Amino acid sequence: MAHSLGEFEQVVLLAILRLGENAYGVTIAAEISACTHREPAPGALYTTLDRLEDKGLVVSRLGDPTPQRGGRAKRYFTLNAKGLAAITRAQQSYRRLLEGCELPGLSHA
Amino acid sequence: MRSAHIAESILALVTTRDRAASTVGDLTEQGATRDAVWFWLSVFQTASSFLWRSVAEHPARLTGLALLGIAVHAGIGLLFAGLDGVAGFIAAYRSGNHLEADSLGWKIWFAAPVLVSSLLIGRMLARWAPGRELAACVVYAVLVSIYSLVPALGNNGALTAVFCVLLVPAGAAWGRNRRLGATRPM
């Protein structure tokens, strides 16, 4: 069954996609903040990551513990094929909606 | 850092221990350039988000568990009421029909069902809802508070609600620790 994605879920998936191998809580929050100029609330970010993993759209793995994190490991997230398909479908829907619309300062194919 | 351990314990009540650890690690890393208020606000906001997510995604199951808990609570109450009758009869017989029901011993005896059932129900909720212990406790506490505050039901009212709110999570933490201790590799 195809999962419908909420707006913030799409933002998080795109941030993970942009970060590649270095996507964990801190870098995902920083990437979202840099691209959208909105700082995500930690509670919203971690529950969304949790939900995306439960939906089977991302997979996570634990890195090595580091001293600057009090000896706690980073949890790295990666999109899997299902996640990639879901975000592609969602973005295609947006693109179809945009077709024929003229938005100031936005050009699209 | 001591505070990070406390934050990790708080988050471990609403998510798995390794997720709690990695989340606190992230907040510690980000907190290096921010103050302690930001760190603690983030911890409590994250904990409440995880808690709300558990309740919102499994409302029927958690309500069912809470109602089962209330049934157990009522059952233990009935058991103690029966024992009260027997003990009261014996005490009255020994003291020559003079029963000191206001004595401290009797007050403890009357409070015992609430104390025992709260701890027991907390443990049961921890076993029935692994990983969602606190969410189950919150739903139970809300329902039992409504039940206890209805005077027509003849309960101890606010006292019962306060006991349940404090002791059920204690029982759940006890049950969770026992479960984690049992599954921890040697």
Image (spheres, grey):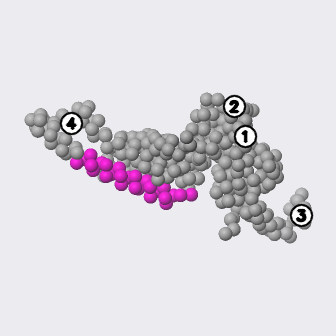
Residue drawn at x 13%, y 38% is: B92
> Callout 1, which amino acid?
Asp
Q: Which residue is mark 3?
A: A108
Q: Residue at x 9, y 35 (%)?
A: B96
Q: In terms of secondary structure, where does tag 3 sit?
A: loop
Tag 3 and tag 4 share a subunit: no
Task: Tell me which numbered mark, 1 or 3, is placed earlier along the sequence.
Answer: 1
Give the CA separation, mark 2 to mark 4: 55 Å
**Image quadrant of residue A39?**
top right
Chain of the residue under the numbered disc 3 shown in the image: A
Find the residue positioned furthest to the top: B2
The image position of residue A29, as x and y in percent, is: 75, 45
Image: magenta residue range: B57-82
Subunit ID for the residue under disc 1: A
Three-letter amino acid code of the residue under disc 2: Asp
Question: How far apart in space, not on screen, are marks 1 and 2 (Cα)?
Answer: 26 Å
Q: Is residue B61 above or below residue B114?
A: below
For label 1, the residue is A64
Foreground tag (4 vs 1): 1
Q: Which residue is mark 2?
A: B35
For the residue labelled by badge 1, is the local secondary structure a helix, a strand or a loop? strand
Foreground tag (1 vs 2): 1
Q: Residue at x 46, y 56 (%)?
A: B63
Within 10 Å of disc 3 (Cα), the crowding (few <14, some 14-19, many 20+) is: few
For the residues beneath circles 2 and 4, the answer to whether they share a chain is yes
Q: Which residue is mark 4?
A: B101
How far is the residue under mark 3 from the one under mark 4? 83 Å
Q: Nearer the viewer, mark 3 or mark 4?
A: 4
- For this orientation, the residue located farthest to the front is B186
- Give the camera-side residue of A105 and B26: B26
